Image (cartoon, coloured by chain):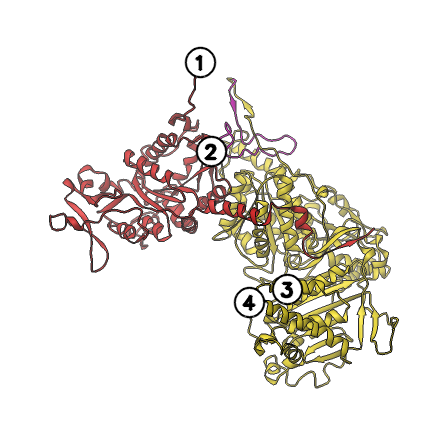
Chain colours: A red, B yellow
Amino acid sequence: MTTTVELRLTARDLKTDQEVRWCPGCGDYAILAAVQGFLPELGLARENIVFVSGIGCSSRFPYYMNTYGMHSIHGRAPAIATGLAASRRDLSVWVVTGDGDALSIGGNHLIHALRRNVNLKILLFNNRIYGLTKGQYSPTSETGKITKSTPMGSLDAPFNPVSLAIGAEASFVARTIDSDRTHLTEVLRAAAAHPGTALVEIYQNCNIFNDGAFDALKDRHQAENTLIRLHHGEPIRFGTDKTRGVVRDHTTGDLRVVTVTDDNEADLVVHDAHAASPTTAFALSRLADPDALHHTPIGVFRAVERPVYDTQMSDQLAEAVIRHGRGDLPGLLASGDTWTVLP
Amino acid sequence: MAASSADTSAADTPDADTAEADTPEADTRDADTPDADAKDVRRLDRVVIRFAGDSGDGMQLTGDRFTSETASFGNDLSTLPNFPAEIRAPAGTLPGVSSFQLHFADHDILTPGDAPDVLVAMNPAALKANIGDLPRGAEIIVNTDEFTKRALAKVGYAASPLEDESLEAYRVHPVPLTTLTVTALKEFDLSRKEAERSKNMFALGLLSWMYHRPTEGTEKFLRSKFAKKPQIAEANLAAFRAGWNFGETTEDFAVSYEIAPASSAFAPGLYRNISGNLALAYGLIAASRQADLPLFLGSYPITPASDILHELSRHKNFGVRTFQAEDEIAGIGAALGAAFGGSLAVTTTSGPGVALKSETIGLAVSMELPLVVVDIQRGGPSTGLPTKTEQADLLQAMYGRNGEAPVPVIAPMTPGDCFDAVLEAARIALVYRTPVFVLSDGYLANGSEPWRVRQLEELPDLRVQFATAPNHTTADGGEEFWPYLRDPQTLARPWAVPGTPGLEHRIGGIEKQDGTGNISYAPANHDLMVRTRQAKIDGIDVPDLSVDDPHDARTLVLGWGSTYGPITAAVRRLRAAGASIAQAHLRHLNPFPRNLGTVLAGYDKVVVPEMNLGQLATLIRAKYLVDAHSYNHVTGTPFTSGQLADALRETLDDHHR
C-alpha cells in the first residue's frame, strides 16, 4: 500500500527567518499575513513565485516571503518584473510597491506595465504618505496636507490610483483595505486568477505618519455609509439596509449616489467588471470624495480579457521558428554577400 | 580586415606600410586594348570615394551598395557614413548634406581614408560641404541639373562654381544626372518626381562602371528590396544600367580604373562586409548560443544604437526576446529582471541613456548578476552630436555610479571586432556575475569592413552552471542556500534562478552580509563587501597587452577602442618614413591588462590619442604614475591617419631634441 504525501504549501512555509521590521501597528503586517495566508491556495511551488519590489516601507515585503525575491530600486520594480515575467512564463511574478514608489518616481513604469498587460500582479500599498523618508506628502495625499515638506499645506492635486490605472488601459483594477482580511483575500484571489497585469490598490494605514487616514472606511458605523462594496453582476447598493445606491446621471453620464426608492430601484447601475468599455469603471473610480473618502468603492472595478504580453512574445518566437526555421548561427553569420579567400 | 590582424604587428605586412601615405598616383598603364575605341583602363592600389547629396538623395544606400559590390569583389575596405541628426533637414542646405565615404584597396587598409580621391556631389550643398576635404587633382562628379540659381544661392554661391575657375584644381565631370535618369526612365509609367528619385542608382551605375564593380549583387538587392513594387525595381535597375552605359559611352569618362582584389591581405576563409552594429548584434546571438542561454534585450531607441535593437528583433527564431521599453531605465530594468531569471541579458544605448541607466547598473553591481551594457558612444555632453562619433563616455562607464561600483569595460577596435568584443563581454558577465560595459562608438557602429565569418568551433564556450543545491550546512546540520557564498577563484556568487527548488532567496540593493546575503548594516561587513566587489573585478582574467614594437622604440602610442585604425595607419606611415615608434591598443579598460604597468614603464614617452579630452590618459596617469601625453580631438569625426602621423611625428621630434 502506498501513501501519498501531499506537499501542499502552508502560510508557515512562506515565512522567512528575517525579523519583520515594519513599525509596530503598521498595516503592512496585515497585508503580509493575508498574502502568506492565501498564496498556498494557488497550488504553486514556492520556487515558482517571485516578489519584486522597489523602495519604500512596503518594498521590504520580499524579505519576508520565503520565495524568490528582489528588493530593487525606487520605482523600477514594474520594469524589472516585466523582464522577468516576459522571459519566464513559468513563474508567478508579484510586484509590491507603494504610492510614492509606483505613482511618483515609478509612475512611468506603472502605466506602461498596465498598458502592455504583462503577467504581473501589482500590489500597491497606498498609505497616502511617505513613510520611509519620514513623513512627506505623497502623490496620493489630499491637497493641502500639512507635512514636514509642506508646512503650509501641499499644493498638489492627488492621483486616484484606480482612475489612473483604468486610464492606462489596465485589464484588471481593484481596491481593498488592509484591515479587511476577507475582502483583501478575495481581491488577491481574483487578481491571481487574472491573466495579464492586475493592479490592486490596498489602502494601508501608516500609524506613524498618517494614522487614521482610512478610518472613515474602517469605522463600523461610518463605513456603512462610506464604503461601496462592488460585486460583479449585482446592483451597486450600500449603506445601512442597502438604502443607498448608484445611478447614472443621464445628462452627464456620470454616476451619482441616491437613496434607493421604489421609483429608482430599477435604475441602479449593475456592476459589470467585465464590460468592454472602461467608462463606467472609471466613473465608479470618481465617486469617492478624495478628502473625506465618502462613497469609496472597493472590490474589482475592472477585469477584462486582453492579450497578455508575455504570451504573445512567446508566440512570436514560436511563429518565427515556423516561418524561418530554428535559428542557424553559421547560416546567419554567412548571410548576405560573401566571398571566399583561398589559401 | 583590421580586426583579424589586430594581434599581428604591422611589420608582418611590409607591403602595407606605405599604404595610406599619400594620394595614390594612378599606376598609368594602358591595359591590353583589343580595339582602338576601347577606353583606357588604369590600375590603382587604392581609392577613396565620397558620395554626397541631400538627406533625401539616398546617399547612404548608394554607399552601402557600392560597398557591397566592392566587398564581394574582394578588395579590403573601410567606410565612414556621415549624416545629419535631422531626418529630413531642409532640402538643399549645408546641414542637410549626407555623405558616405568608402576607402577600398588591393591591400590591407585600416581607415576610411583621410581625403576623397573622388567626390560625387549631387547638389551645390554637397559640393560646398565637402570641397574643403578634397586634395588637388581629385575628381568631382557633379549633378549639374541641381546647380540652379536658387540652389546655389541657398548655400551662398554667388556664381556657379562650375562656371568660374574655383574648381580649376580638380578634375570635374559635369553630368546632368537628373535629366539623364528621367530620360532613361521615360518608358516607365512614372511621374518626373518619381523618376528623379532613381538618380542615385544612375550615379551608382556610373561609379560601378568607373571602378569595374560587379553588378549582380545590386541587381539582386533592388529586385528583393522592391519585390512588392516590381515597376520601381525595374526603374531603379534601368537607372543603374543607364549610369553604367553612360560611363561606357560618353567621352567625358575616358578612363576607368581597376583595383585588384586584396588577396594577400586576407587570411583564407569566407568573408562578408559587416558594420559594427551588425557585428555586435551577431555577437550577442552567438554569445547566447555559446552560453546556451536565451538572449533578452531591453532597450529604448537611441542613435546610434537603435540598429542593434532592429537587428536582434529580426531574429526571434533564435529565441531572442527584444523588449522596446518605455524609457532607458525600463530597458535596463527589464534586462536585469531577465538576468535574474537566467537569460543572457543585454541593454543597448548611447551616452545619454547610460546616464539614465546608472542606478540600475549599480543595482546589478550590488546584486552581482550578469548583464551586458552596450554604449554606442556619440558626441556629448547632453544630446550633443547624436549622429557623430566620440570616445567621451570612458569615465562615465568607469565611475558614473554612486558608491564604489566597479564595472568591467571592453572596447572593440574595429567594426568587425564588435563581434568578438561582445562575446568577451558576455564571458566576463557570465563568469563573474557582473554588469559589463561595451564601449563602441558611432564610427564603429556605422562603419564597415570585410569580416572573416567565424566558424562555430572558433567561438568560446560560454556555458555556465546555475546553482542547483544548497551550499551551506548550518550548525545543526541543516542545509541552506547562501546567495553570496563566493567561488574562491573568481569571487563570483552562485546564480540561482527562480524555479530552482530549495534555493529561494532574496537579493537587492541594500548591503548584505557576506555569505548569507541577509541585510547587513555592519561597518566591518560593508568594508569587506566593498573591497570584495572591487577585488572580483580587479581579478578578472584578461589577456596581456601585446605591443607592436619592431625597432625598440622609445615612444609608445597607446590607444583604445575605435582609434585603432587611424593610429595603426599613422604608425605605418611614420615607420615607412624611418621613425621608430611602438604601438599598443587597449581592448580591456577595466581591469587593465596585468602587464600594462610594465609595458608603460618600458618607454620614455607615452602618447595617448583619444576622441575626448584625455580620459584614458587620466586613468593611466592615476594608476601607473606615468606622464602620459594626450593628443585629443573632439570634432565628432574619427582621427585621420595623416593628422595623427603629424602629431606623433612632432612628439617624436620633440623627444629626440
Answer with left or right where residue A234 lies relative to residue B191: left
The residue under label 4 is B87
Apparent side of residue B573 relative to residue B368 in the rendered image (left or right): right
Please give the label number shown on residue B41.
none
Residue A1 numbered mark, or none? 1
Mark 1 and mark 2: Cα distance apart in space: 32 Å
Q: Nearer the viewer, mark 4 or mark 1?
A: 1
Q: Chain of mark 4?
A: B
Magenta stretch encompasses residue B490: yes
Q: Secondary structure at mark 3?
A: helix
Residue beneath the point at 57% across and 37% down: B530
Q: Disc 3, disc 1: CB below 8 Å?
A: no
- The span picked out in magenta is B477-506
Looking at marks 4 and 3 on the same chain, the residue that comes earlier in the sequence is marked by 4
Near-viewer residue (B429 or B68): B68
The first of marks 1 and 2 along the sequence is 1
Q: Residues within 10 Å of mark 1 (few under 14, many from 20)?
A: few
Q: Is residue B632 magenta?
A: no
